[in-house]
Image (cartoon, helix red, strand yellow):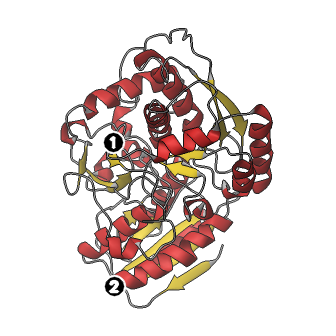
Amino acid sequence: MRLMRLGNGGRPARSRILASAAAALLLAATAACSDGGGGGSAPKAPTLAGTPIKVGLFNPDTGATALLGVKAGTDAGVRYVASELGGIGGHPIEVDSCSVDGTPEKTIACANKFVQDRVVAAFDGFNYSSSAGIDILQAAGIPLVGQIPFDQATGSTGAGRVFFAAPQASFLVGALQGFKAEGKASATLTLVDTPAAHKTVDTELKPLSQLLGIQATGLYFSATNPNFSAVASTIASTKPDVAGLIASPSESVCTQLVKNLRSVGYQGDIFVAACTSFIKADPAAAVGAALYSSVWLPGSEQYAPPGVADQLRTAGKYLNDAGGPADYYGYGQFATVVDFAKGLSAAPSLDNLTGATVLSTLQATKGAPSFLGPDITCGKATTPNCTTQMLLFTVQKDLTLKPVTGTWITPAPAIMATIPGAS
């Protein structure tokens, strides 16, 4: 475990929990909606007459950073597209799934498999090492399509890729802006020890905190043998206003860290990245917490724009039928599949599709409403992302999720412009 201190200064933290968000790794659906946000079963997918559109999936289902909701979200989204949209112009999506575990070797092997299998696009699947396969995919003319680029190198340029949601930096900038607005002067944040994590701390957390005038300390924990008692003690020793996770590989990590922070006597604000399981574990402590997302989540229906509640209920049914988990990664990947299908439906021809046609069609998306997300415009020269907007929720007394601004937050453009691929 290594500790990196950034900036200087600090002050005692207050006693309520603040669970906020950070770098690319978002969330899970609120525990108050354990059925995935929808009751009943989704309709059976019809048989479609068009030739299948084959898409690869970097499926992060193994390793210390496994995200099982990705495969469930993909399967549920494919069934939704077939059942509710009639496919992509009558063509079903055929998924060529390949298991990855966060290592470059697995990503390279899957990229080569997709080339051999002649897919016309590949779903990123929140892959921590997606940049390892980029050159292989680009050489074969296969675009990479996703929600958020978890690999910072992948998100640093727009060539050969499209991500429908905001870049990692949006969530970090949004969180830091929120800390600053609430008068916070210091934050000690941790994440799993990976090369991507070090890039996040060194090239995003450090310069952004300096720009916003916040002392930031980056702390890493082992992916295979984390000692959260030691992590919590180290965090508490820095006496931060805000403590917690930049990103989390699992819900259990969040729950353990919160428990250990309290056990060592830390009484300040807790920032929990991609998690909500602690809400169910201790509902009373969860009230007043904050979390971020690239999409509307179950529990936010009463605050969402017209139509979003129906989308959440529908997505929940399909995710339940797919076997879940209906967490953030499930909803985020579901939205990715739907936005892919809707965007690709504008292709000049859906017969004999090529990767080049898929890429140019998706990049031509302008001002289109996304599924559970904001309006998106893709194909910018400086970024693979179609928006910079994100949501920041607070947990209410009834455990619903209310956006802190009532709607989408746009991180400061001047700060985003300093980060490669972020604007």
Residue 128 vertical position relative to residue 55 in the rendered view, above or below: below
Q: Nearer the viewer, mark 2 or mark 1?
A: 1
Q: What residue type is labelled 1?
A: Ala
Q: Name the residue under label 1.
A: 368
Q: Considering depth in this image, is 167 or 375 the residue closer to the camera?
A: 375
Side (left or right) of 127 relative to 406: right
- Distance in Å between CA atoms under marks 2 and 1: 44 Å
The answer to whether residue 102 is visible is no
Q: Mark 2 points at which residue?
A: 11
The answer to whether residue 258 is visible is yes
- Single out the residue that lies furthest toward the bottom: 8
At 36% from the left edge and 54% from the top edge, which residue is drawn?
Answer: 292
Q: What residue type is labelled 2?
A: Arg
Q: Helix, strand, or loop for circle 2?
A: loop
Which badge, 2 or 1, is on the more N-terminal residue? 2
At 48% from the left edge and 47% from the top edge, which residue is drawn?
Answer: 363
- Residue 9 rendering spot, x and y as whole percentages: 39, 90
Which quadrant of the figure contains the N terminus?
bottom right
Residue 423 vertical position relative to residue 320 in the rendered view, above or below: below
Side (left or right) of 219 relative to 26: right
